[in-house]
Image (tube, helix red, strand yellow):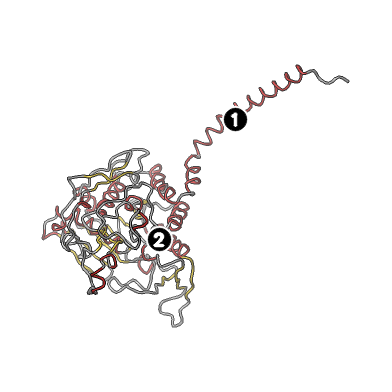
Amino acid sequence: MKPPSSSLYFSSYFLRKIRISYFLLILLPFFVLIIILYSEKFSCFFSQLDPRISIQQQNSISSNIRKNKKLPFAIGETKERCNVFNGKWVWDEKRPLYEESECPYIQPQLTCQEHGRPDKNYQHWRWQPHDCSLPSFNATLMLETLRGKRMLFVGDSLNRGQYVSMVCLVHRLIPENAKSMKTIGNFDVFTIKDYNATIEFYWAPFLLESNSDDAVKHRIEERVVRKGSINAHGKYWKGANIIVFNTYLWWMRGPHFNILQGSFDDEVKDIVEVSTEEAYGMAIKSMLRWIKRNMDSNKTRVFFTSMSPSHEKSIEWGGEPNKNCYNETKMIEDPNYWGSDSRKSIMQVISQEFGKSKVPITFLNITQLSSYRKDAHTTIYKKQWNKLTQEQLANPFSYADCVHWCLPGLQDTWNELLFTKLFYP
């Protein structure tokens, strides 16, 4: 039998190719439709490879809410596809937004000019997103929005700094006899009488009950957090119209953390050691459950501020070994800079828990933009609660505070971003 001729073979092959190509052509629109419909999920999947990107994707949480209904307090929208947390710092002669001497509510731990800081450049930087501009902070709009309402910041001393910044941004519009500041237990309460409004801070560095809950005496070496105890603090948060949570710094004591399974009143305490990531995730889950049970998404807004970076190791930004943020007056220019103090594994926990939750919460991703600001810390220009030794005085790097921020300064930008997400989500 003769083998098939080459011309017949190639004709058959050619016809098969045409049929395959025609089949693929029919399927192509289907694939395109699938990609369009699920592009956000694909994006979230691939973004898990980089915790910084995945946290930025959490802005989609607010976007998903916005698709279904208008958010409370919203009066407009940010330009579509503009990530306000992605940008650069630009010099602005019109800043600061207020003077340190004009705001009597700034704690002495944050009044850098009063305590001898020689430069003011750190006050003049404004955050500029790449694809849009932030709306100007409007204190009148903020006060009118708060009329008859309660705004609450919950967390650690860094959240207290943001709270004080917010008070400083609005207080000049309020007559002296119509405002007051009081400290009651874990609360700092700024009352605006004519508006029947309060701006408050509540000390809860872990959000859950812990052995560090005293608002004054909380410097405890062996920190312990009680599992499932958010209501110990949460009962005081009920009734707030706007809540801004944060928690991070106090968890950073190594790879493991102590969790109390019973009560602090138990004579024999059942304490287990778990990874810091597991312990932190437990707190985030508890917070989200509390929000779901206690906050009416039709009337209230909830925000979560990401980790505030510190600058303890100058070698990480090209400086000398064994030095830190002391005497730093310029910011970090590398747009990809990410310090070791901002633990990526914790960012991943936040990303995973927020990603799984349907709780309406707005993420304020201040970590990357704050990472550049090694120039903005209080360093040695603050009230020292303990008398410094001669050895410390001879080496300012040994006692420089590279965690907290001068006011006015960086944390005013955090509130500009909060303002943007509150009114233009």
For the question of whether residue 239 can be seen, the reply is no
Against 152, is 222 above or below?
A: below
- Left or right: 130 as drawn, with respect to 105: right
Percent from the top left, x then y, of residue 106?
A: 19, 61
Q: Residue flagged by tag 1: what amino acid is it? A: Leu
Taking 424 as reference, is 12 above or below it?
above
Q: Does the rendering let one see residue 264? A: yes
Q: Secondary structure at mark 2?
A: helix
Residue positioned 37% across, 69% down in the render: 232
Where is residue 9 drawn, in percent x and y? 76, 20
Q: Residues within 10 Å of mark 1 (few under 14, many from 20)?
A: few
Q: Which is more foreground, mark 1 or mark 2?
A: 1
Q: Viewer-proximal residue, 214 or 325?
A: 325
Q: Residue lying furthest right in this view?
A: 1
Where residue 109 appears, x then y in whole percent?
Answer: 22, 65
In this picture, residue 34 sits left or right of residue 263: right
Q: Residue furthest top?
A: 7
47 displayed left or right of 248: right
Q: Which mark is residue 118?
A: none
Quarter of the image that includes the N terminus: top right
Q: Quadrant of residue 101?
A: bottom left
Question: Residue 218: x and y, percent?
Answer: 32, 72
The answer to whether the residues at label 1 and label 2 have Cβ atoms under 8 Å apart is: no
Q: How dense is the environment of label 2, judged by Cα within 10 Å: few (below 14), some, or many (20 and up)?
A: some
The residue that disc 1 covers is: 27
Residue drawn 25% across the image and 56% down it: 149
Mark 2: amino acid: Met
Disc marking residue 287: 2
- Residue 84's image quarter? top left
Residue pictured at 28% horizontal, 40% vertical: 133
Give the Cα distance between marks 1 and 2.
45 Å
